[in-house]
Amino acid sequence: MDTIDYKILYILQNDGRKSNSDLAEAIGLSPSPCLRRVKALEEKGIISRYVGIVDAKALGFLINAFVNVSLRSQEKSTLEAFQSQVSDYSEVMECYLMTGSSDYLLRVVTRDLEHYEKFLVEKLTKIDGIANIQTSFALKPVIQRTELPI
């Protein structure tokens, strides 16, 4: 990784749809070496995918919940079973294995509180091995970044 690679990453984090020719111009390379560098970053897994960021509120997803989940056991099989099950739920936007007072932190989006309650009762609480669930609801986003500080 050199300064040109970091420039490429910085630009693509802010505009993943930028054409190769525009990207090359922005970093001061010709298109062919620029494309080779981008492909190399993709092959190394540094660029893992390209996405469009959708405004959840504009689509009616008004609830952003942070859910702490504690399991009865931290055995590998219990952790793997939880992770496998929760990965099937489209409401779960992020899931982190944690240290501290809970085992997992989930970020869950739903259209309203009724939908969250349905998710909680019909999906999350049905997973074997859960000892405790605590939910906090976000009132509003203050900082919401997708770019790494490179």
Image: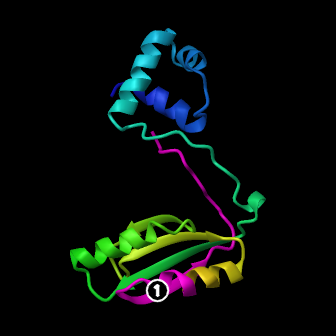
Question: Where is mark 1, residue-wise?
Answer: 126
Relative height, residue 81 to residue 46 (above, below):
below
* 119 or 138: nearer the viewer: 119
Residue at the location (62% across, 43% down)?
52
List x then y, in percent, for residue 51. Answer: 57, 43
Q: What amino acid is at disc 1?
A: Lys
Name the secondary structure under disc 1: helix
Relative height, residue 87 to residue 58 (above, below):
below
Q: Is residue 31 magenta?
A: no
Relative height, residue 125 to residue 19 (above, below):
below
* 46 or 126: nearer the viewer: 126
* 114 or 68: nearer the viewer: 114
Residue at the location (44% across, 71% down)?
86
Q: Quadrant of residue 73?
A: bottom left
Q: Quadrant of residue 121?
A: bottom right
* 124 or 62: nearer the viewer: 124
In the picture, measured across the screen, residue 145 lies left or right of residue 45, that is: right
Q: Is residue 142 magenta?
A: yes
**Is residue 4 at all visible to an observer of this figure?**
no
Magenta range is 121-150
Q: Quadrant of residue 139?
A: bottom right
Instruction: Judge the density around disc 1: few (<14), some (14-19), many (≥20) Cα neighbours within 10 Å.
Output: few
In the picture, measured across the screen, residue 35 lies left or right of residue 64, that is: left
Residue at the location (40% across, 67% down)?
96
Relative height, residue 32 to residue 78 (above, below):
above
List x then y, in percent, for residue 147. Answer: 52, 44
Report the colour scheme.
Answer: rainbow
Which quadrant of the figure contains the C terminus? top left
Residue at the location (65% across, 62% down)?
142
Which quadrant of the figure contains the N terminus? top left
